[in-house]
Image: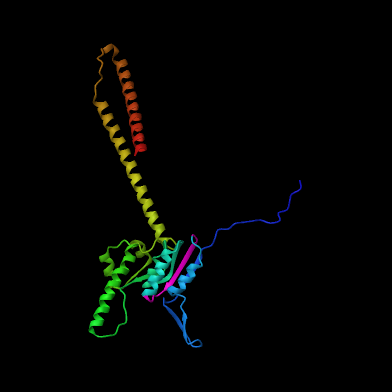
């Protein structure tokens, strides 16, 4: 049989996600360019992100990788909202640090995955201010308003109350992946060590409940049979008989009692089995 050689093959592969790396401080401006006598555009500015996201088609996948100490709040919050508005499936990988406003950016994603050894830092905003007493007091009041607005972002994801969040941010809290998973600051730990342990614990609990239910069923059956045997043993024969037929009647009564006991045993076993199926 003559076989036609394959001249070409079309293989449609799954589209790979667009990867974005935030591996530096988040700033509006980059380094100062002495040749041009101006600041270069920062790769972590909101302006740069706006251009970058405009080139990514809607409906595609985005992988956001973060390893940053944070930076300027106005840039970070703007990036958060730009990513939030982007109609893509977004997954954030915290490769090491997602501190301060860098973690705010992470919360724009549909899913947050933390690597082993990574951490996040949540804290109150701070600023550099100058001016007279009245102007400095206003700066403090403005920070309170900004913090109240900023906490709304955290509360959309975490399971903490606002008062708990206020205390943790006031104390400048660093959280491990395990704590982040507990509080709702992340969805998964890369390596799945904590997730697997949680699933194992849940599976063991279900198995233990099932064993307890079966044990109770067996104990109920055992008690029923014990009560029946004791009742049958103490019950005298119902038919009177004379001396001439005594041996025959005793034999018949013993056989009937054994049959009744066996029937009761199977009835009880069947009822327990049906009950287990209904449970």
Residue range of the region highlighted in magenta in the rendering: 59-72
Please name whichever residue, 200 or 267, is drawn nearer the observer in this view of the structure: 200
Task: Classify residue 3 as left or right of residue 225.
Answer: right
Q: How is the image coloured?
A: rainbow
Give the image location of residue 141, x and y in percent: 25, 76
- Residue 62 in the magenta stretch? The answer is yes
Please name whichever residue, 105 or 215, is drawn nearer the observer in this view of the structure: 105
Q: Which residue lies at the image location 71% right of the left edge and 56% below the top edge?
A: 7
Please name whichever residue, 219 or 120, is drawn nearer the observer in this view of the structure: 120
Q: Quadrant of residue 275?
A: top left
Question: Can residue 114 be seen?
Answer: no
Task: Classify residue 190 as left or right of residue 161.
Answer: right
Give the image location of residue 276, x and y in percent: 35, 38
Give the image location of residue 177, x and y in percent: 38, 66
Q: Which residue lies at the image location 31% right of the left edge and 35% below the top edge?
A: 221
Question: Can residue 209 be seen?
Answer: yes
| Residue found at the far right of this picture | 2
Instruction: Count all numbered tags in the image, as a single digit.
Output: 0
Q: Quadrant of residue 109?
A: bottom left
Task: Classify residue 67 as left or right of residue 276.
Answer: right
Q: Eyeballing the image, is 258 above or below 35?
A: above
Q: Eyeballing the image, is 228 above or below 136?
A: above
Q: Quadrant of residue 260?
A: top left
Q: Which residue lies at the image location 33% right of the left edge and 46% below the top edge?
A: 209
Task: Classify residue 246 as left or right of residue 26.
Answer: left
Give the image location of residue 236, x and y in percent: 24, 21
User: Which quarter shows the C terminus?
Assistant: top left
Q: Which residue lies at the image location 26% right of the left edge and 77% below the top edge?
A: 140
């Amino acid at each position: 049989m003559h076989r036609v050689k394959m001249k070409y093959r079309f293989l449609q592969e799954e589209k790979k996600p667009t990867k974005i790396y935030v591996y530096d401080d988040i700033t509006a401006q980059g380094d100062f360019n002495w040749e041009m006598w101006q600041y270069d555009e920062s790769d972590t500015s909101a302006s740069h992100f706006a251009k970058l996201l405009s080139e990514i088609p809607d409906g595609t996948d985005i992988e956001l990788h973060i390893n940053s100490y944070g930076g300027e709040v106005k840039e970070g919050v703007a990036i958060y909202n730009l990513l939030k508005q982007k109609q893509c499936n977004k997954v954030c990988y915290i490769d090491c640090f997602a501190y301060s406003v860098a973690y705010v950016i992470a919360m724009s994603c549909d899913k947050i995955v933390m690597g082993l050894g990574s951490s996040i830092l949540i804290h109150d905003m701070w600023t550099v201010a100058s001016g007279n007493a009245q102007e400095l007091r206003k700066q403090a009041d403005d920070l309170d308003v900004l913090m109240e607005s900023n906490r709304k972002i955290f509360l959309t994801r975490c399971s903490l109350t606002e008062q708990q969040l206020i205390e943790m941010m006031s104390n400048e809290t660093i959280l491990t992946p395990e704590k982040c998973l507990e509080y709702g600051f992340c969805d998964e730990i890369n390596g799945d060590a904590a997730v697997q342990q949680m699933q194992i614990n849940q599976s063991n609990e279900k198995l233990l409940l099932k064993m307890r239910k079966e044990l109770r069923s067996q104990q109920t059956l055992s008690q029923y049979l014990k009560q029946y045997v004791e009742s049958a043993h103490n019950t005298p024969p119902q038919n009177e008989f004379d001396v001439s037929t005594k041996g025959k009647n005793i034999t018949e009564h013993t056989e009937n009692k054994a049959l009744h006991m066996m029937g009761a045993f199977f009835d009880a076993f069947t009822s327990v089995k049906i009950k287990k199926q209904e449970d």
